[in-house]
Image (cartoon, helix red, strand yellow):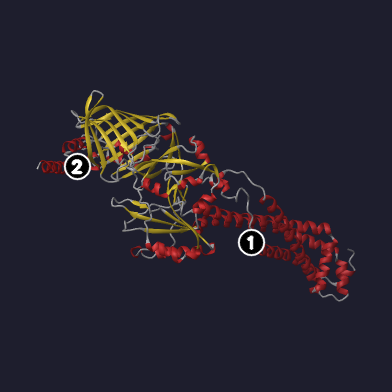
Amino acid sequence: MKNMMSVVVALVLCVLVTGLPAQAQDFSHIEAILERLDAQSRFDNTDFSSVLTMVVEDVEKGIEKMVVRQFRRDDGERFLLLIQEPVTEKGQGYLLEGDNLWFYDPSSRQFAHTSLKENFQDSDARNADFGSNSYSSSYEVEGYLEGTLGNFEVYIIDLKAVDDTVPFPFVKLWVTKDSDLVLKTEEYSLTYRLMRTGLFPKYTKVGDVVMPVQMVFIDELVPGNKTQISVSEISVSDIPDHVFTKAYIERVNR
Amino acid sequence: MFLTMKVAFRNISRQKKRSFLLAGAIAFGMLVITLMNALTGGVVGTIRDNFSHALGGHVFITGQEWTDAGQMIMKIRPDENLDRLLEENATQIEAFTRRSQAMPTMIFGSKQTMQMLYGVDFTEEDKLLDSLVVTQGRLADVLVEENAVILPQPVGERLGVQVGETILIRLETLTGQQNVGELKVVAFIEDQEELGLSAAFTSRSYLNTLLGMDQHEYQILNMFVTDLSLVDSFARIFREGLRTPDEGEEEAEPQVAVMVAGVPLDPLAEAEEITPWEGTRYRVMHINQIMEAVELVVGVLNRVGLVIFLILLVVTMVGITNTFRMMMIERTKEIGTMRAFGMHQKQVKNIFLWEATFLGLLGCVGGLVLAGVISLIVGNITFDADPSLQFFLNQGQVVFDVSLASVIGNTAIVVLISLLAAYWPARAAARMSPMKALSSHT
């Protein structure tokens, strides 16, 4: 009888143990955080412009400073990035029109189709870093931990891309518990190798939007390569429609 | 006729110096055009061979399909129809390769470089390993380790990597996702062909994993045909055999989209609106499509050469006319004597014309011999030229290839122009009155 009881207990335990992984973990509050992250990164009601100062550190090429003027209109998924420094690249521009991202080179006076997945110039930033976030639609939550980053209590969230339209198939986010700020990101390759770390130490509030004004992207494959970006001259004034056109990029170069 | 020919030949040898100068002028023209023709002919053949070797075949098949996310990707899945075509045309195929390819960034420590990387089934492409020249390491190790890589020596030097060490490669999957792989360096090879088209090799299955493809998929099927003259019809068989019903009839051969070291060979191709399709659509290209542009340039060069040749001949023609006029004056008494002994006007004319023909032919032979000697000497010099120029050379040597048709054609032009130049002096000599000629003081 005692033996039978132990068999039953073992069976029940076995069912419980094997049944546990089958139970879906509840990530609804994490998903809600992702939705809030996406929402607070979008300038839906206003236009946005700023100046980005980028310091690109490359172990082989040395340090290069770039100044880029940024115009954004998230309603319609548009942005324009105009390079102002260095002089050799002045006039080059990136124009996003919905799903199409164009690169303009004033020396050839031609537009070439490019992708949000590509790196911005020779920096460690990607073209996609200059638009709004889409964590909630592009990724699903794989798991999360609670921890601290410096003095901040954070959720460490593991994300997996829902399809292959995003450049990084796996992403890890460090999000503050109390204010929904992404302090750190880690982006992984399809073979789950860490490729890039992003640090976002400073934020500012512009209307309803919370945006990082200092960003550091570290290339984890080539030790020593990193890019620091500072955002200044922030404005939410209306931007004329013609700014988000190819003709404008061509005209400002004349 | 034999008599007139004999007299004409004797006349040429009477004034050796003058005949030598005239024939020399003709020979120079012949030398220029022959060298030009031989050089362009050789360059076409060399470029064709070099392209075939660099691209890995004479006929290239790629496949394109659309993903669910609306992205067009380049890959070929296992296809019974394609296998059947390969089997049916096996007698015309010398060798074929099924490869994947990528242009990853190779990283070792803080050094990085971009490099063309081919994914090869080493058991299927058994001749590849024999064709590579190893400078360090063992090629056979690629069969042992799946992520083994064979690197061109300069790439290894640039990265500062040694045989046995592991490098990282950063690349994108076919759909553009970031991926990283590790490759173990098993051997260094001499840079292929010194054409500036260096390639690294790893196993296809490993590269496929990194590109997001299945083990048996690949991106390009290259075929070497047994008879290069049949390459157009051979390619057509595959083009028609692989066409899907919804593709419709093709009006013309597709634009070349072959990549060399990741660079498309049709930079002028314009973006066009494409409607997505189901399944795989194949593109079949062949070496002659690539060579069309080269042959166009060579054709222009040949025409320029012909114009220079004709200019040289016109100048020579003036010389021949003047010389024959002089000869006519010098031989006035002789012409009178021959006419007095019963020689016809036509025979006198023919003597002059045969002289011109012999001079032309002598010049041609001289020019051809000189061209042969020069091409033999130059063709044996090995040039250590810039890698881009190596594309025009065969293992560093200039190849001269002159066609018999162009030699016959050029000779005919020389003889014709010589005859034309000598015609009026010959006619004047023939019409000379024997009485007046005999009483002449010259």
Label 2 packing within 10 angstroms: few (<14), some (14-19), many (20+): few
Nearer to the camera, B341 or B136: B136
Q: Which residue is drawn at 63% across and 49% down?
A: B397
Corner quadrant of residue A155:
top left
Nearer to the camera, B303 or B77: B77
Q: Is mark 2 on a helix, strand or loop?
A: helix
Q: In this view, does A131 lie to the left or right of B352?
A: left
Q: Gap between marks 1 and 2, in whole Å? A: 78 Å
Q: Is residue B377 visible?
A: yes
Q: Can residue B250 be seen in this view?
A: no
Q: Which chain carries label 1?
A: B
Image position of B87 with respect to B291: above or below: below
The disc placed on residue B403 is 1
Quadrant of the snapshot with the C terminus of chain A: top left
Q: In this view, does B96 lie to the left or right of A54?
A: right
Q: Is residue A201 left or right of residue B248?
A: left
Label 1 packing within 10 angstroms: few (<14), some (14-19), many (20+): some
Residue B375, x across and y down, in percent: 68, 53
Nearer to the camera, B329 or B122: B122
Residue B187, x across and y down, in percent: 50, 42
Q: Residue at x 34, y 45 (%)?
A: B176
Image position of B193 with respect to A142: above or below: below
Q: Are marks 1 and 2 in contact (CB under 8 Å)?
A: no
Q: Do labels 1 and 2 share a chain?
A: no
Corner quadrant of residue A30:
top left
Nearer to the camera, B108 or A35: B108
Q: Mark 2 lies on which chain?
A: A
Residue B207, x across and y down, in percent: 40, 47
Residue B280, x across and y down, in percent: 35, 58
Q: Name the residue under label 2.
A: A21
The disc placed on residue A175 is none
Q: Which kind of residue does numbered mark 2 sit on?
A: Pro
